[in-house]
């Protein structure tokens, strides 16, 4: 994979390569981790804090555009050979306070938001998944089917329990029924 010089000027690439080398050298890996063991790490804090990243990355890295930050993060994910499934599993099952806080904000509902995607961010993810990966649609529909059935049953129960819609036996007469069925409007 080569870097696009229009997006990443050569001096920035060289700077990042030096920082990346120092970053990789800073790890003292003494054992091989399997995916399952990584997810069960006994910690309630992230293993790397701001100081760690300040030592590795250039000081103005936070000033780069969001797009460049996202490319940097995903490049690291690819470099470390982490699958999207492993990353998402970690994000959504972690007991680490900082991670759970971010996930809670992502999963929260904000009725005053400026768009439906911002109002409930999982809607944006589902919509992008549904629209951009048509081969996944059948599995997405299969995944949400139990939720839709539950919603339909809940609404049905509400209608059945609604006092205004209930027919009372004392109000049922042969003439009231024959008037509706024999003389439809």
Image (cartoon, rainbow, N blue to C red):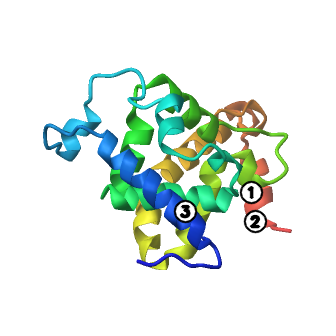
Position of 134 relative to 58 (above/below):
below
Say which residue appears at 39% left-offset and 46% top-offset: 23
Going from N to C along the chain, the mark reached first, 2 or 3, is: 3
Q: How busy is the neighbourhood of tag 3: few (under 14 within 10 Å), some, or many (20 plus)?
A: few
* Observer-nearest of 185 and 49: 49
**Residue at screen point 85% across, 40% down:** 112
Residue lying at 64% horizontally and 73% vertically, measured from the top left: 7
User: Would you name the residue on which mark 2 appears?
Assistant: 182
Q: CA distance from mark 1 to mark 3?
A: 71 Å
Residue receiving disc 3: 71
State the quadrant of the N terminus.
bottom left
Say whether marks 2 and 3 touch (CB < 8 Å).
no
Q: Which mark is residue 178?
A: 1
Instruction: Say few, some or many: other residues with alpha carbon within 10 Å of mark 1 (under 14 / 14 to 19 / 20 or more).
Output: few
Which residue is more in the foreground, 132 or 9? 9
Q: Which mark is residue 64?
A: none
**In screen coordinates, is 34 left or right of 134?**
left
Q: Are marks 1 and 2 in contact (CB under 8 Å)?
A: yes
Q: Relative to 162, is 12 above or below? A: below
- Image location of residue 169, percent across then percent down: 67, 34
**Where, by quadrant of the figure, is residue 76 drawn?**
bottom left
Q: How many numbered discs?
A: 3
Residue plotted at (75% across, 65% down): 182
Q: Is residue 145 visible?
A: no
Tag in front: 2 or 3: 3
Q: Secondary structure at mark 3?
A: helix
């Amino acid at each position: 994979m080569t870097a696009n010089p229009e997006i990443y000027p050569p001096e920035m690439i060289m700077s990042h390569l030096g920082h990346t080398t120092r970053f990789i050298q800073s790890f003292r890996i003494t054992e091989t981790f399997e995916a399952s063991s990584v997810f069960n790490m006994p910690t309630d804090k992230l293993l790397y804090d701001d100081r760690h990243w300040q030592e590795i990355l250039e000081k103005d890295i936070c000033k780069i555009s969001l797009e460049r930050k996202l490319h940097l993060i995903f490049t690291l994910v690819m470099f470390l050979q982490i699958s999207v499934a492993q990353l998402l599993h970690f994000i959504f099952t972690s007991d680490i306070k900082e991670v759970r806080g971010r996930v809670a904000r992502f999963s929260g509902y904000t009725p005053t938001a400026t768009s439906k995607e911002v109002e409930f961010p999982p809607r944006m993810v589902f919509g992008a998944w549904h629209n951009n990966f048509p081969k996944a649609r059948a599995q997405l529909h299969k995944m949400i089917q139990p939720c839709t059935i539950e919603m339909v049953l809940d609404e049905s129960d509400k209608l059945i329990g609604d006092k205004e819609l209930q027919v009372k036996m004392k109000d049922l007469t042969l003439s009231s029924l024959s008037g509706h069925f024999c003389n439809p409007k």
